[in-house]
Image: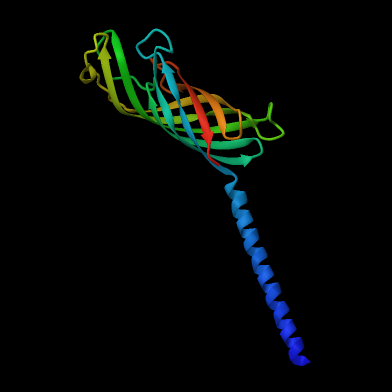
Amino acid sequence: MIQIYHHLHLHMTKKILLLTIHLYISLIFNGIFAQQSRFDAGIIAGLNFSELEGNSITDYFGLNTGVMGTFRFSKHGQLGMEFLFSQNGEYILPESYPPLQYGQIRLNHLEIPLHIDWLIGIFQKDQFHDWNLNLGVAYTRLIGYHAEDIEQSNVSNQIVYRDKDAFQLQAGTTYHFTKKIGLNLKASLPLRVDGLSWTLAARVIYMIG
């Protein structure tokens, strides 16, 4: 009788122990996933628009594409960071360049924006925050350039850049049609604004998470 009781007690102890371990592991993984749900990642593809040597802000355009990550720190706030290949942004001035009529221009930049997003629910507020406002700064570095005059002659070697690094003030807005797909409109203005103007960007964002 004592052996039967001891066997049942041992069996129950093992079950309770296994149940406790299972519950503990479940809590750990639920905690991890809860933390992971604060993070999201996405792909960005769109265009920059700038004046450069033209007469209006839409005279020159180029790619604005890359990846982004976000960290949700409150119900209506998140931190966003992007790594972009950005063309024809009006971010820096050359030290010297010839006074002529320019044709095709390609200014290739690495662009790293860091921004705070204010999340707002408008039409889909019962399901997700479909609209947000973005405000931040961006580091940019010129990694290559090509310029032609109006007769398509290469004049790149006549353009000299002393500083290739710059910082931009950026503001924008994003509307999410679904949880994954959104349209972002962004404006950038260099901190050193002498002789420089706005760069506008229109991008499609696809969130992976």
Colour scheme: rainbow
| 105 or 172: nearer the viewer | 105
Residue 25 percent across, percent down from the top left? 62, 63
Q: Quadrant of the C terminus?
A: top right
- Is 23 drawn above or below residue 135 in the view shown? below
The residue sitting at 49% across, 25% down in the picture is 203
Look at the image and tell me in which quarter the N terminus lies. Answer: bottom right
Left or right of 197 in this view: 17: right
* Whether residue 108 is situated above or below residue 151 in the rendered picture: below
User: From the viewer's perspective, is 115 left or right of 199?
Assistant: right
Q: Residue 5 sits in which quadrant?
A: bottom right
Q: Position of residue 142 (x, y in %)?
A: 33, 28
Q: Position of residue 202 (x, y in %)?
A: 49, 22
Identify the residue at horizontal 63%, vertical 32% (top origin): 119
Q: In this rendering, does residue 172 appear at all? A: yes
Residue under the image location 46 percent in, 29 percent down: 45
Residue 190 appearing in the image:
no
Residue in the foreground of this view, choosing between 126 and 88: 126
How many numbered dots are placed on residues in this image? 0
* 113 with respect to 132 (left or right): left
Vertical placement of residue 12 versus 92, above or below: below
Q: Position of residue 36 (x, y in %)?
A: 57, 48
